[in-house]
Image (cartoon, rainbow, N blue to C red):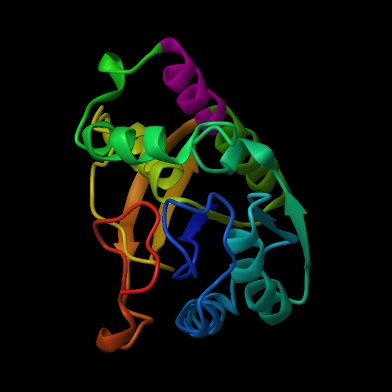
Amino acid sequence: MTLYLVRHGLAAAGVDDLDPGLDPLGHEQARHAADFLQAVNVQRVITSPLRRTRETSVPIAEALACDTVVRAEVAEVFDASMPVEQRRAMIGPFMAGRWPDQPDTLRAWREQVVACLRELAAEAHDAGRDVVAVSHYIAIGVAIGEALGDDRVVPVPMANTSITSLAFEQGKFSLLKAADVSHLPPEKVTGIHTAMMGKG
């Protein structure tokens, strides 16, 4: 059983807009990811509730001829009520930090991500299938860190629609490939060092 975690495509806005849709390039990136994943054996595509992930999931679900299921547990780390200036001030130090140094609310959010991914992986393993989940920079970083025993908030840089693959055996994840961009033409790789990347 393999868990494929797809970061959303390039968003049409940055941190000022908590829930932007995709930029035209983001839609192209999503189609490239769909082509890459079209042979994966899944029953459904999991997506966060935010627009950029839902829009990224559309061509993937179409390529796999399956439905999408929204799971809030794989959404963005930002609280929707957090003011823009606070998000701006938080994101840099947060991404450079480690989970043990974060507030209780953020550590609880991390545990929620891990629990959700374990649940999805266990269900798929029992059914003899794989999982595709479209999520966000920090949530995918959580999964990579869990597999590697790495407590950095950002264990590896992740481009838009990069695909991270993890195996799941006996309740544990192991990393197969982190933030793969081999499906993207080099000129379409964006957002490697940015959690919410707008135009530019």
29 versus 117 height, above or below: below
Q: Is residue 164 shown left or right of residue 133? A: left
Q: Nearer the viewer, residue 143 or 43?
A: 143
Q: Is residue 176 shown left or right of residue 70? A: left
| Residue 33 seen in the figure | yes
Residue 185, image x, y percentages: 32, 88
Q: Examine the structure image and report whether residue 128 is included in the region drawn in magenta.
A: no
Residue 121, image x, y percentages: 60, 42
Residue lying furthest right: 67
Q: Examine the structure image and report whether residue 105 is included in the region drawn in magenta.
A: yes
Number of numbered callouts drawn: 0
Quadrant in the picture for residue 96: top left
Q: Quadrant of the C terminus?
A: bottom left
Q: Is residue 57 shown left or right of residue 8? A: right
166 versus 86 height, above or below: below
Q: Nearer the viewer, residue 138 or 64?
A: 138
Residue 61, image x, y percentages: 70, 72
Mainly helix, strand or loop, the magenta region? helix
Determine the residue positioned at 34% across, 41% down: 88
Determine the residue positioned at 49% across, 42% down: 168
Residue lying furthest top: 104
45 versus 199 height, above or below: above
Residue 55, image x, y percentages: 64, 69
Magenta residues, as a range?
104-114
Determine the residue positioned at 42% across, 59% down: 14
Determine the residue positioned at 36% across, 43% down: 141
| Residue 41 seen in the figure | no
Q: Is residue 144 shown left or right of residue 79? A: left
